[in-house]
């Protein structure tokens, strides 16, 4: 059955949006299958690496959203899920307004279908904006593209912050508290539209990461040996509320060239290694200088992604512990750079980076 489409006028979520994010498409699409978005929408062509699809919606010029003005997300048709797709350095998410309930509007099975890049919307995960918990302003939950639920997502929480700003019609600099599976997270939207996030303290105790690798530095695992696919790798284990295994190369390797890593082959073997009882995210890191690192990531439950915010934080912690970097670093990811700071005075990690609108959509459930 062919999809029927109609265009609607959508106000700009914030007057502080960058020029690239203002050129988004707004659309209401009705179809029997989730595949309509993949087949019939053109993503923002200003986004690096974006594929080009057939346009069936009208691109709207940005407008200043006035109080009480009509919003796409105000639509309440039963049986349809309205969403906004965002990306943080290419790590893309379907954002759902779930503020009226602590029960996700999408099941893990539905999330898998929505995230499918051939037959669905296409995303690394579905994020739900829920009511606050234990005194926080909001709660954030995520279903990965495989239906699993991670504790937290660094790029996701930046997208979450921009989504909340749109829902609440906030402009300029704002911060709020967010309850996540990894604990309290505090994102702050900056004047330039980027989002700075207090990611809290890293967890280094081996049992809490968790990893079965024996602690070799106090209670932590730092530059420890692990055999993967017949090769010995040197790894440091860090939790940012979710587990990370950070490696700067095979044992004895001086400076790994991460672009040469066959991520699809080696990534799953790290993720499912028996020393990681909750599976693990894995970061492969190249050092350019004490303030400049480059990483590629295999994410637990999502596979190879263009960016991982918690992973970038874990990378800087591991680099400092191994004596490879300072506490303030630019971390290059396939989707672009993040600024990461591990402050000595409070032991908190601060991540700063962009979050951009991709498009608005609607899908039958």
Image: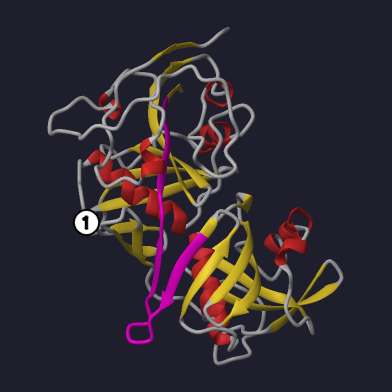
- Residue occupying the far right of the picture: 230
- Residue occupying the far left of the picture: 67
Q: Can I make out residue 187 in this image?
A: yes
At label 1, counting other C-alpha atoms closer than 10 Å, the crowd grade (few under 14, some 14-19, many 20 or more) is some
Residue ID at (56%, 42%): 147
- Residue 198 is left or right of residue 262, and the answer is left
The residue wearing badge 1 is 174
77 or 337: nearer the viewer: 337
- Residue 38 is left or right of residue 351, and the answer is right
Secondary structure mainly formed by the magenta segment = strand
Q: Is residue 69 above or below residue 243?
A: above
- Residue 28 is left or right of residue 276, and the answer is left
Q: Can I make out residue 241 in this image?
A: no
> Splitting the image into 4 quarters, where does residue 225 fall?
bottom right
Q: Is residue 245 magenta?
A: no
- Residue occupying the far bottom of the picture: 218
Q: Where is residue 219 in the image (x, y as percent from the top left)?
A: 55, 88
> Splitting the image into 4 quarters, where does residue 80 fall?
top left
Q: Is residue 278 above or below residue 256?
A: above
Q: Position of residue 156 (x, y in %)?
A: 44, 52
| Chain part drawn in magenta | 337-361
Q: Position of residue 208 (x, y in %)?
A: 51, 74
Q: Position of residue 196 (x, y in %)?
A: 34, 63
Q: Is mark 1 on a helix, strand or loop?
A: strand
Q: Does the magenta stretch include residue 340?
A: yes
Q: Quadrant of the N terminus?
A: top right
């Amino acid at each position: 059955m062919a999809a029927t489409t109609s265009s609607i006028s959508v106000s700009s979520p914030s007057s502080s949006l960058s020029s690239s994010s203002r050129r988004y498409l707004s659309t209401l699409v009705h179809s029997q299958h989730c595949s309509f978005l993949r087949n019939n929408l053109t993503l923002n062509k200003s986004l690096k690496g974006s594929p080009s699809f057939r346009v069936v919606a009208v691109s709207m010029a940005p407008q200043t959203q006035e109080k009480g003005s009509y919003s796409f997300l105000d639509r309440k048709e039963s049986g349809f899920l309205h969403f906004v797709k965002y990306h943080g350095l290419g790590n893309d998410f379907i954002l759902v307004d779930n503020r009226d309930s602590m029960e996700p509007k999408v099941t893990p099975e539905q999330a898998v279908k929505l995230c499918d890049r051939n037959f669905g919307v296409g995303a690394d995960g579905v994020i739900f904006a829920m009511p606050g918990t234990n005194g926080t302003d909001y709660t954030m939950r995520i279903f990965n593209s495989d239906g699993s639920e991670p504790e937290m997502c660094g790029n996701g929480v930046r997208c979450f912050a921009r989504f909340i700003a749109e829902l609440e019609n906030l402009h300029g600099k704002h911060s709020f508290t967010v309850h996540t599976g990894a604990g309290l997270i505090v994102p702050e939207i900056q004047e330039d539209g980027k989002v700075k996030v207090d990611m809290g303290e890293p967890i280094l105790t081996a049992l809490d990461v968790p990893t079965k690798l024996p602690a070799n530095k106090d209670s932590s695992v730092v530059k420890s040996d692990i055999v993967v696919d017949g090769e010995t790798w040197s790894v440091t284990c860090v939790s940012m509320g979710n587990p990370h295994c950070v490696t700067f190369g095979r044992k004895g390797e001086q400076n790994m060239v991460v672009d040469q890593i066959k991520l699809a082959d080696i990534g799953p073997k790290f993720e499912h290694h028996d020393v990681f009882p909750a599976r693990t995210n894995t970061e492969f890191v190249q050092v350019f200088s004490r303030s400049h690192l480059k990483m590629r990531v295999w994410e637990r439950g999502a596979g190879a992604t263009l960016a991982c915010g918690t992973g970038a934080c874990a990378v800087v912690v591991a680099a400092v512990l191994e004596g490879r970097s300072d506490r303030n670093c630019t971390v290059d990811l396939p989707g672009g750079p993040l600024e990461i700071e591990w402050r000595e005075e409070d032991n908190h990690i601060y991540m700063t980076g962009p979050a951009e609108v991709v498009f608005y959509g609607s899908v039958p459930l």
